[in-house]
Image (cartoon, coloured by chain):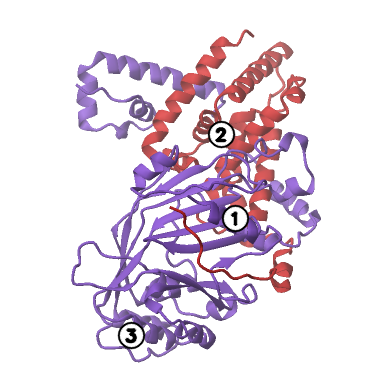
Amino acid sequence: MEARPWTLGSVPAPAPAVIEKAASPRVPDAFEDLFRAEYGRVVAIAHRVLLRRDEAEEVAQDVFLQFHQRHDPAAGYAPAWLYRAASHAALNRLRGNRRRVARETANHDDPPVDPAVAVEAAERRQMVRDAMGRLPRKSATVLALRYGGLSYAETAAALGVGIGQVGTLLRRAEARLKKELSHDPR
Amino acid sequence: MTHVDEGRLRRAHDEADILNDHDRAHLELCGECRERMALVASTASAAAGWLEASPLPVDAEAALAHVRRTLAATPAQSNAGLRRRLIAYLDRPRHVSRPLAATAVLAVIASIFGLMVVSGTAQSMLEIFQPKKFVAVQVSPVSLGALPDLSKWGTMGVVKQPAFGVAHDQAAAADATKLALLVPKTLPRSVTGGGTWSTMTDGTATFTFSKEKARQAVAASGGTLPAMPGNLDGTVLTLTAGPAAIETFGRQPLPSELASPDPSNTRGAGPFAGMSIPQLAIVQMKTPQLTTSGASLKDLEEVLFAMPGFPPDLAAQLRAIDDPTHTLPIPIPTGRANTPGLLVGDNTGLGSAVIWEKDGKVYAVAGTLTQDEVMAVANSLG
């Protein structure tokens, strides 16, 4: 069966008034409210992937900027979108910048401690980062969301799955992470 | 004996209340399940340690100040507003249902024309609306902003909640929706990646008019209720929509990617790769229908048009529709449509959409594409 549209019309480009209004760089109050309410959780989600606060904050701010350019801050789906975007953006940063990251041994999150302990902690973080980078995207995402502090319902909303599936996804992801880390020769 | 599945065991590690009496009784008797639960808990605890799942204090105000500075330094994009709204619409999480009355225009159009459904049980109901044709009506966002919220004129009810899901392929989507689904034979070159299927089962909602509620709503805004037909009070409109399937393709490059391409952020590997940001969406759904238990479509129209603040030009456009029972008016902001029709788009790729009905199904093809590309996709469905 072939379906064909039966008629058509056309529309011109958007009116200048619309363009002018949309081009304003002013940060609306609703966006500021959203930022204040969700920034900490978005950073936490990115941090579970990157294990570095400075990188997690960069990712979180970029995610909010992208959201501001594209979405209504009052939209009901805003938190779920931000959570998922934070996880994906952090994973892409991890995978795209692996070479640069591999050269870094210190972590800005570490308090000043014995240099040997600091090196060991940095190596352990790098090992976990690499393992997260090797996981299937969905597995890494559910780990970032859940260990980033989201409830099961919030994790389900961010993933776009039923709440009953979260436990199964989380269990599989944890098992995969354990397997990846147990195979790491370091 | 049915064992407790690992998903429930894992959730029980965090939320012990999730286990019901049957699960608890089973766990008491089943050593195998207790062993699995211990393993699940052990792995979860290890993962919490690896991922450093502890609170991370942040300075949100300092971060917000940085974001403000970045926004102020970002050059405005000529089509940022429309693009944002279009992408935001396409980018909505698939499991989130569209609110029926999110705006005044939706309250008006959705309450009277957009509430399209048929009741499967009420045989006595008169079918008053089933879209077979689509026509653009030009509306001014300013005048619509002054309209009262029609949802306050009665009571909304959900008879059957639609279920949303994701299907692996066309066959699975067809199985979930019981629809014969079409797929495009050709796609524009700019559209990347394979199709992703989402599904919705059928749902039924009702709206029961109440003269008293309408009077209160109008009085609250300082107006007077227009004359209403005697049979309107208590009239139940029943809308049945779905099942439906939507296939999405590709992803929309972000404005930042367009402005400063980054080799590590190519399509398919960018920061939002894997997210539902489609360039193209193809919707197929059983033609929705609307029935009424009392007032006719003409009665409803006249009440609607007599509402304080209802734009006269919009009323004139709706009255001019030859076959209102089978024509769905699609509101288009003033200045965006110069020819009533069912294709809305431009030739810059900013966004286009086409909608039509055939053999009891409504089809829509939309995307951040030119109207020629959208039409080519629509005509290739088979």
Residue B58 percent across, percent down from the top left: 64, 40
Chain of residue at mark 3: B
Q: Mark 1 against mark 3, which lies toward the viewer?
A: 1
Q: Which residue is mark 3?
A: B299
Label 3 Cα neighbours within 10 Å, binned few <14 / some 14-19 / many ≥20: some
At label 1, the amino acid type is Ala
Q: Secondary structure at mark 2?
A: loop
Compared with B159, B337 (above or below) is below
- Residue B277 left/right relative to A158: right
Compared with B99, A9 (above or below) is below
Q: Secondary structure at mark 1?
A: helix
Residue B313 percent across, percent down from the top left: 54, 86
- Residue B158 left/right relative to B269: left
Q: Check if mark 1's residue and mark 3's residue have beta carbons within 8 Å.
A: no
Q: Quadrant of the N terminus of chain B?
A: top left
Q: Which residue is mark 1?
A: B376
Chain B color in figure: purple
Label 1 Cα neighbours within 10 Å, binned few <14 / some 14-19 / many ≥20: some
Q: Which residue is mark 2?
A: B55
Chain of residue at mark 1: B
Chain A color in figure: red
Q: Earlier in the sequence, mark 1 or mark 2?
A: 2
Compared with B374, A175 (above or below) is above
